[in-house]
Amino acid sequence: MTEHLSGLVLSRPCCDAFCYATRSKKKRLGFEVLQRKIWCQKNILRRKKLPIAGKKNIAYPLVTLLDGDRVQQFSETPTPEQRKQVEVELMSDELADLVSSVLEKTADGGVVGVIVNTVARAQAIGYELDGKAPTLVLHSAFVATERTKIENELLEKIGKNGQRPEKLVIIGTQVLEQSLDIDFDILYTDLAPMDLILQRVGRLQRHQNKRPKQLSTPQLVVMDGSFSHLGEFNEGSEAIYGRYLLMKTRYYLPQVLNIPADIPRLTQLVYDEVDDALNGEIDGLQEAKKKKRLRCQPN
């Protein structure tokens, strides 16, 4: 998404992946209107041939200031405390595999985050883990008062300076990746567009906490339907995010993430349709790309 604040341009890739996941029908319609405005704006910028200096800039964080035809950019170097190296593991999205992995990883305790793409899947995982590990479930289907209550409980338990439990599995949808200052020892996530995975990683070992030996280093486990089903993505994930972004994210997802250095590079690789280097590299990518363009274009 792109927001303009008195000439300040904050860029985020095409907003369909972000907007549809956690919004009500009324808000989704509002975002569709905004998306059409952005689409038209982008075409105007192309016709004017304005210099978009930030397109290939891989600094992070990066602020781009557009003043008429003039583009200025500002960035700062992350401190050592803001850097982390994350091991990435792929596994199937089968519930039995997830439960087995979680129980194994938390044999000596630990706080586990499980972020999935649909409410139904979050509920199913909560049901499967019930009685096997202490759990807390949070998703967008909760009424506002109940959701606020659960969020406050999370902050008390695993927020900064929270009273961390010996063992807890937090299961939720995209609401867990937004705003909450919480800290997981290990993170499981459904495959999602690259920028959203990276945003979820922001909740992984966020603060300086004592952790179980087995979970002493940051670990990200990506649950991917295509990992075990011959290229077929989870139906709910594909309905929300589209096949194109999932295919490219799966292709570019590294075995080790260097945060924050990898954030702009990986995001640009996934969202860059103009200089798409994967033509012919992934079966069905071009067809998925056409469907994405039809989905993003205004009516």
Image (cartoon, rainbow, N blue to C red):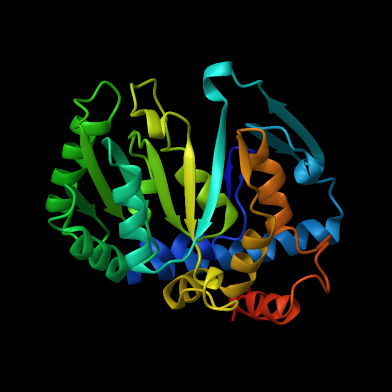
In front of the other: 193 or 134: 134
| Up-down relation of residue 160 to residue 135 (above or below) | above
Q: Position of residue 49 (x, y in %)?
A: 87, 54
| Up-down relation of residue 105 to residue 61 (above or below) | below
**Left or right, 157 with reference to 15:** left
- Quadrant placement of the C terminus: bottom right
Snapshot quadrant of residue 252 = bottom right
**Left or right, 110 with reference to 11:** left
Snapshot quadrant of residue 160 = top left
Give the number of marks. 0
**Left or right, 21 with reference to 289:** left
In front of the other: 76 or 267: 267
Residue visible at 27% across and 35% down in the picture: 108
Residue visible at 77% across and 38% down in the picture: 57
Residue 9 in view in this figure: no
**Left or right, 42 with reference to 91:** right
Snapshot quadrant of residue 99 = bottom left
Q: Position of residue 147 (x, y in %)?
A: 18, 51
Residue 22 in view in this figure: yes
Residue visible at 76% across and 61% down in the picture: 44
In front of the other: 274 or 177: 177
